[in-house]
Amino acid sequence: MKAFSEKETNPLHSIEQWEDEVLNRYPEPNAKAKEEYRNYAAPARDTVKEFYKLNHTYQSLDFVKEKRKEFLQFNRKEMPVWKAMEFLNTLVDDSDPDIELDQLQHLLQTGEAIRRDGHPDWFVLTGFIHDMGKVLCLFGEPQWAVVGDTFPVGCKFSDKIVYPEFFISNPDSTNPEYNSPLGIYAKGCGMRNVTMSWGHDEYLYQITKDYLPEPALYMIRYHSFYAQHRENAYDHLLDDHDRKMFDWVKKFNPYDLYSKNPVAPNVKELRPYYEDLIAKYLPKTVKL
């Protein structure tokens, strides 16, 4: 794991100030108001609600265990990071109500917003690769098992999760062992001991965990965990170290969310910079 300075680990201001500061600059042009993002009451695309119905029905503890066993052997494919990123050109995220650009373009927008604000290069790299785990779709995985908001399994589903009504069809909803706030966990056990719903966040964390600073790894692993970093619905599971690291997740989130805009970045122009950044921190090829 890369070392990082103490100066780099102190999140700036309150998260409210940080979001407002980022939103004042990104996206442009055609900026949306802050409250227009993550509009699940009236999503721009019909796929969003159907996506979450499937996601919440099938993301059970047993399902997650099966997927971890299946994919965390990393024995399916090996490729350079940039090639994996190029695959994302074929993917438009059905869970995202805010953007219809392919994923590579969204990731470049995120990385460039972070870069323009003068953050450390590992932070810029994190912005660029944070959704790379969506290469799970390479292996025929449905989007509901790859993207979307994440949440703990093995305990009661919070009503702060988007479309909580769809959990009624999840088999864990009728399992008494999983239907208390703690479920199978202990209070303050720490997120390292909590099993999250399966998807690209956990997958990429497992790929990069030996190469990036810990704040970057928290950003990758929990950037889709909106029920916590926006709603604090699972405070009872966090320990003090998690709370410190979640400040970084909250710092990252405005770049992920508010950098989305319909103007595509110049991939050819930006590629050399990001390939150099990849080479600095990550191996020449990654096993998927």
Image (cartoon, grey):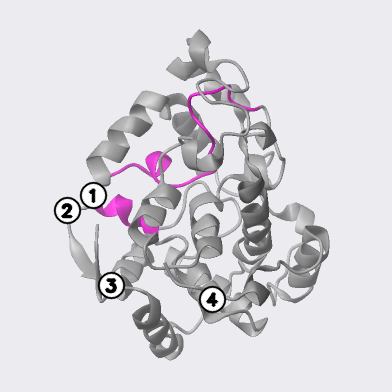
- Coordinates of residue 117 in the picture (x, y in percent): 67, 81
> Is residue 43 in view from this perspective?
no
Residue underneath mark 4: 124
Disc 1 crowd rating (10 Å Cα; few below 14, some 14-19, many 20+) is few
Judge depth for marks 4 and 1 and give the one in front.
Answer: 4
Amino acid type of disc 3? Lys
User: Which comes sooner in the sequence, label 4 or label 3?
Assistant: 3
Amino acid type of disc 4? Val
Judge depth for marks 3 and 2 and give the one in front.
Answer: 2
- Label 1: state its secondary structure: helix
User: Which comes sooner in the sequence, label 3 or label 2?
Assistant: 2
Q: Is residue 36 left or right of residue 65?
A: right
User: Which comes sooner in the sequence, label 1 or label 3?
Assistant: 3
- Label 2: state its secondary structure: loop
Disc marking residue 139: 1
Residue underneath mark 3: 83
